[in-house]
Amino acid sequence: MGGMIKTLKNTAKGAMKIKKLPQLMQVAPKNEKDYFNFFFWRVSKKLGCIIVAGLALFFVAAVLFLKIGGVPDHLECPVFDHDSFFLKFYSGKVKIRASDGHVAYVGEVKGGGVNGSGVLYDKDGNLVYKGGFEDNVYSGEGILYQTGNVRLYEGELQEGVPSGAGQLFDAQGKKIYEGNFLNGGIVYEELTGIPTAQVAEKYRGKQVIYEYEGGLSVFMEDIDAVYCAAGGGDSLDGEWTVEALYILSGEFRSGREQAGTYKELTDSLGDSIYRGTTKASVQDVTAWLCAGSGGLRGDADAIGESPVTVTESMKDVYEVEETGNELEFGIAVYENEGFRYTFFFEAGEKLSGDAKFLFYMIEAA
């Protein structure tokens, strides 16, 4: 009987507490002293207390949530979905899941975005990028990866693309080029006018040599370029200098813009200093055939009555001789910041508007 009475008393006390709760929720003020002024408004003191308490509880809950993360993951660091509201307020190392559920990023966040160092993964867990981030894009020192977690580029990046000093790698991870990059492309201009020995320090990929009277052309297959050298001596060892560099691409980079037509070139480089046709030199023909076939390899039949003949003298070394047959190109020549750019078009094409060039050459102006 005594135990039952005690239980009833406790129950009654609980009922009294429950009855008091609705009283607390009655926020309507009864007289003037129950108000306080907030700018132009008069606010109930009880209502204000409830709002402040609610906000305090919300932020305490948010802090606790951020401390443990969205979902615990072996207690390493918090894990957030990519669109998590709480991620906007977190600073430190996190894991971020993509919309398909895979962990796409492991690294630092700050100020509502990816800022600091981190690693980006694809949906199969392969490396995509490792290095610095700024406002959710690649920035600073970093490594870009290709298939199989093999490095593609290592060096400086700005606004998401290679810019600055860096190294380029082939499909096996072998370094093929070391130099400066701008807006995602090689700064080819720095290869012009330097000794061939310095080119050999920068470019370590596959090359094919074409010798002709008075000089030679070297096809740098892994970076789609051909340099032409002349000088004294019978070797490439420091006595030869790069006089011209052919870029085997129909796109020209100027700043963050890419130009592929006559109009786009003029918009980027200003008015051309020459526009017309030219008889192709042996250097021009060699570069054109390398662009079209990935290297002459002794076969120049692609242009019918070829202006050159090619004979292999040893592995990856060829002798080139002119045949007397002529080949013409349309050209547009520009000068910009100490360099002369010659863009080659198909013969007979009107050099205006949307006319597209085939490849181009860089020389010191």
Image (cartoon, helix red, strand yellow):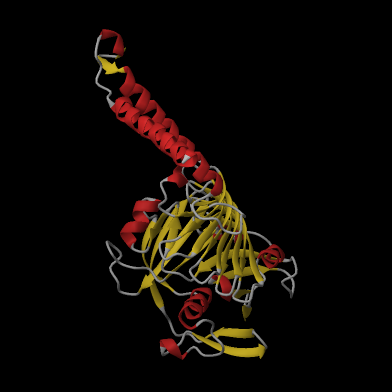
Q: Is residue 295 above or below residue 127?
A: below
Left or right relative to 21: residue 138: right
Q: Residue at x 36, y 30 (%)?
A: 16
Q: Quadrant of residue 197?
A: bottom right
Q: Is residue 99 visible?
A: yes
The mark total stands at 0
Query: Camera-side residue: 73 or 241?
Result: 73
Q: In the image, what residue occupies the spot 47% across and 36% down?
A: 6
Report x, y in % for residue 316.
64, 84
Q: Is residue 175 above or below residue 253?
A: below
The furthest residue to the front: 1
Residue 250 in the figure: left or right of residue 176: left
> At which x and y percent is residue 110?
52, 42
> Measured from the top left, where is residue 82 in percent x and y?
43, 55
Side of 354 where 339 appears, left or right: right
39 relative position to 98: left or right: left
> Could you say which is closer to the camera, residue 228 or residue 315?
315
Q: Is residue 288 above or below residue 272?
A: below
Spot occupied by residue 357 in the image (x, y as percentages of width and height):
38, 68
Q: Is residue 212 visible?
A: no
| Viewer-closest of 360 and 223 | 223
Who's the residue at 63% across and 90% down the image? 312
User: For the view shown, which residue lies furthest in the top direction?
Assistant: 32
